[in-house]
Image (tube, grey):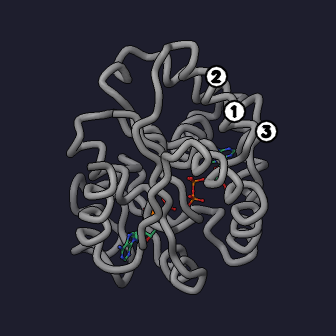
Amino acid sequence: MRILLIGPPGAGKGTQAVRLAAHLSIQHISAGDLFREHIDQGTELGQNAHTHLRAGLLVPDEVTIGVIKERLARPDTERGFLLDGFPRNLAQAEALDGVLADSESRLDAVLDLEIPEAEVVKRIAGRWLCRRDREHIFHVDYSPPEVAGACDVCGGELYQRDDDREATVRMRLEVYRSETAPVVDHYQAQGLVTTISALGQVQEVLDRALVAIG
Ligand code: ADP
Ligand code: ADP
């Protein structure tokens, strides 16, 4: 299966993507995680991307599309993939359409996570991530780790993202409204979109997503 997960920052894309990808035995590909790996490794691409992440702006398309194309070309995506946080503007959506056309494949579903901004702000403010494995995601109130500062799954150190501060979050929400929301219309025109509420327990949202992809 080939699935896209779209939604504002903090909607729960990563949280759902990890579970959906495991359930469907497909690769979870997060553009943000790929950039954070580059940043941690200190690559030139990472240094360039970091400027944009810190400002809450999109990394330029030529860089982002290149990173995603390279990842999609790996053989482990043959069974399918779940793209989390890509495409985030129309140019990226068109680039993805091209990649799919070249490989004579198509998307099965686009999930659009809907959530009020007030809830997004709470989710982001309390988000803690594991340094060892970015797929281990916690929240200070909603899914707190048993030991403060340590990952329940692997014991890794928990940290808060430097772009999760208030001013940057406001910018990311603005970028979502102006650049990413039109992507939903792009796929709506292809009849692929199901909008689901991202409110409620993680399991409830997951159940909605599973129903949506059938
Ligand atoms: P995104 O990838 O869309 O930015 P995350 O999956 O990282 O979002 O989730 C943002 C924060 O909200 C995390 O701290 C996560 O633990 C928490 N979270 C995710 N889904 C839910 C939910 N259904 N209810 C409460 N908190 C949630
Ligand atoms: P969130 O969904 O919580 O905003 P992500 O990890 O998906 O977090 O994205 C974090 C940052 O990474 C974005 O604010 C942006 O700077 C960069 N980024 C992620 N995905 C893309 C993309 N598709 N195009 C350009 N930049 C991206």
Residue in the foreground of this view, choosing between 137 and 8: 8
Q: Decide: is 87 above or below 8.
A: above
Q: CA distance from mark 1 to mark 3?
A: 15 Å
Pinpoint residue 197: horizontal percent, then vertical percent: 42, 73
What amino acid does circle 1 point to?
Glu
User: Residues under labels 2 and 1: Cα distance?
Assistant: 6 Å
* CA distance for labels 3 and 2: 18 Å
Check disc 1: other Cα within 10 Å, few if <14, some if 14-19, many if 20+.
some
Residue 34 placement, left or right of 179: left
Marker disc for residue 60? 3
Does the beta carbon of the residue at mark 3 sit less than 8 Å from ligand 2? yes
Count of number-bearing discs: 3
* Place of residue 85 in the rendered image (x, y in percent of width and height, measured from the top left): 56, 49
Q: In the rendering, at what x and y percent does residue 167 appear?
A: 75, 75
The location of residue 28, given as percent across then percent down, is: 38, 39
The CB of the residue at mark 1 lies under 8 Å from ligand 2: no
- The reply to whether callout 2 and callout 1 are in contact (CB within 8 Å) is yes
Left or right of 21? Residue 99 is right
Residue where numbered disc 1 is placed? 94
Q: Is mark 3 in CB contact (under 8 Å) with mark 2?
A: no
**Residue receiving disc 2:** 98
Amino acid tagged 3: Pro
Name the foreground residue: 67 vs 201.
201
Q: Residue at the location (33% across, 80% down)?
A: 200
Q: Can you tell which quarter of the image residue 158 is in? A: bottom left
Instruction: Give the crowd class for mark 2: few <14, some 14-19, many >=20 residues within 10 Å.
Output: few
Answer left or right for 94 relative to 5: right
Name the amino acid type tagged 2: Gly
Residue depicted at 58% across the width and 86% down the height:
118
What residue is rendered at 64% in x and 34% in y?
42
Is there CB contact under 8 Å for labels 1 and 3?
A: no
